[in-house]
Image (cartoon, helix red, strand yellow):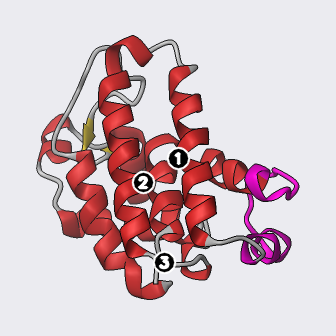
Amino acid sequence: MNKNYSHSLEMLLEHEGGFANHAEDPGGITNLGVTKRVYEEWVEREVSEQEMRDLTKEDVAPIYKSNYWDRCKCNSLDSGLDFAVFDWAVNSGSGRAAKALQTIVGADADGAIGPATLALVSNNSAENLIEKMYHARQEFYEGLSTFDTFGRGWSRRNKETLEAALEMID
């Protein structure tokens, strides 16, 4: 629920780390998990590499809240499931995480979590959904062409998210 946003953001930022510009990462220049493209959309102007290097938690927190936490309706999800959905949304897009959750609960996988999806979510235990999200996320990663390059890190992150999410269950 809403009480978990700050804690979830702290855990997420540990996963995301600092500045990166890996040649094989389609996200390009990234800092604190926010890509240059996402930050430019947020501030509605082009930004320099130095501006990206200088990003702070305070700069990126509102982006995470609006573009990922709120978009995926994490405030309406059980403790633990909120973090599992949020972390995957940030790592692979809010639509992908939302569609995965919708598929798991048998909702229309349109990428927009609404009342119908939330009703189906409520018919499942948080533990069950968290574990299914973990497996769906791992399968997604293993199907990517860049798994050989980034797979160990993605798999570690997915496992850490699973463990942290399960510990958060009320």
Q: Is residue 138 visible?
A: yes
Coordinates of residue 170 in the picture (x, y in percent): 46, 84
Give the side of residue 81 with respect to residue 110, left or right. Answer: left
Coordinates of residue 8 in the picture (x, y in percent): 34, 69
Which span is picked out in magenta?
103-122
Q: How far separated are the C-alphas under marks 3 and 2?
A: 12 Å
Of 9 and 147, which appears nearest the observer?
147
Q: How far separated are the C-alphas under marks 1 and 2?
A: 6 Å
Which circle's residue, 1 or 2, is located before the other in the chain?
A: 1
Which circle's residue, 3 or 1, is located before the other in the chain?
A: 3
Q: Tell me if residue 154 is in the magenta stretch.
A: no
Give the side of residue 82 with respect to residue 162, left or right. Answer: right
Q: Which residue matches tag 1?
A: 134
* Residue type at numbered disc 3: Ser
Residue shown at 29% from the left, 75% from the top? 7
Q: Tell me if residue 119 is in the magenta stretch.
A: yes
Q: Which residue matches tag 3?
A: 79
Q: Which residue matches tag 2?
A: 162
Residue shown at 39% from the left, 74% from the top? 168
Badge 1 marks a residue whose secondary structure is helix
> Can you name the residue that lies furthest to the bottom here?
3
Coordinates of residue 104 in the picture (x, y in percent): 74, 52
Of 40 and 87, which appears nearest the observer?
87
